[in-house]
Amino acid sequence: MTDELNTPSIEVEVNSDNKCDLCEGSKCCNYITQEIDTPRSMDEFDTLLWQLAHKNNQAYKDEDGWFLLVYTKCQFLQDDGRCGIYETRPQMCRDYTNDYCEYDAPAEEGFELFFDGYDSLLKYCQKRFKRWDTRFTAE
């Protein structure tokens, strides 16, 4: 196989040792997730709605539960995609495994529910709770 310049291309076997080097944008270092209690009541969904009213916040439910997803780049992510504090990185980073990660498949494929922002969660709440739009009116 050759590329546009007729130079031989080298096929690289992707494994957990080199996967991070091949990942464009260091996807896992550009967000955090925080597990949240399963929202059940209108008040609990209203709190989640407030959280999604803030920029760069999303929410999802997968087989492990409900999560707040906050897009925010790690301050120690270097321009070359490497960790600037690798030797002293937090335990959370040390525990992370790239055996199966966003390089292999988008995380969204495992979501049972996904809310990309305020409007999508509001629509869900209006469907789930028939009285959603009247929750603040006096009874």
Image (tube, helix red, strand yellow):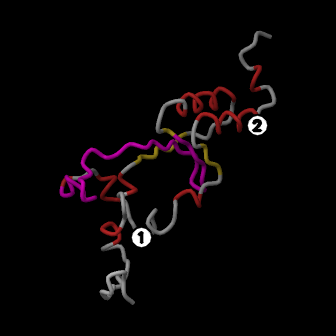
Q: Is 55 situated left or right of 84 in this image?
A: right
Horizontal placement of 24 versus 60: left or right?
left
* Foreground pick, 86 / 12: 12
Task: Look at the image and give the residue range highlighted in magenta.
Answer: 58-87
Q: Residue at x 59, y 31 (%)?
A: 49
Query: Residue 53 or 1: which is nearer the viewer?
Result: 1
Q: Helix, strand or loop at disc 1? A: loop
Residue at 32 percent across and 55 percent down: it is: 93
Residue type pointed to by label 2 = Arg
Q: Which mark is residue 25?
A: none
Q: Residue at x 65, y 39 (%)?
A: 120
Q: Where in the figure is residue 79, as x and y percent of width and height?
A: 24, 54
Residue 128: x %, y % from top left: 76, 37
Tag of residue 128 = 2
Q: Nearer the viewer, residue 68 or 64?
A: 68
Q: Amino acid at mark 1?
A: Asp
**Rendering quarter of residue 12:** bottom left
* Pointers 1 and 2 in contact (C-beta within 8 Å): no
Q: Is residue 64 above or below residue 133?
A: below
Q: Is residue 24 above or below residue 45?
A: below
Disc 1 marks which residue? Answer: 99
Marks 1 and 2, how far apart in space? 37 Å
Q: What kind of element bears circle 2?
A: helix
Q: Earlier in the sequence, mark 1 or mark 2?
A: 1
Please identify the residue farthest to the top as the structure is shown: 138
The quadrant of the picture occupied by the N terminus is: bottom left
Q: How many marks?
A: 2
Q: Position of residue 17 (x, y in %)?
A: 31, 74
Label 2 neighbourhood size at 10 Å, few (<14), some (14-19), many (20+)?
few
Horizontal and vertical percent position of residue 100: 46, 68
- Magenta residue check for 11: no
In the rendered image, the vertical position of residue 132 relative to residue 33, given as above or below: above
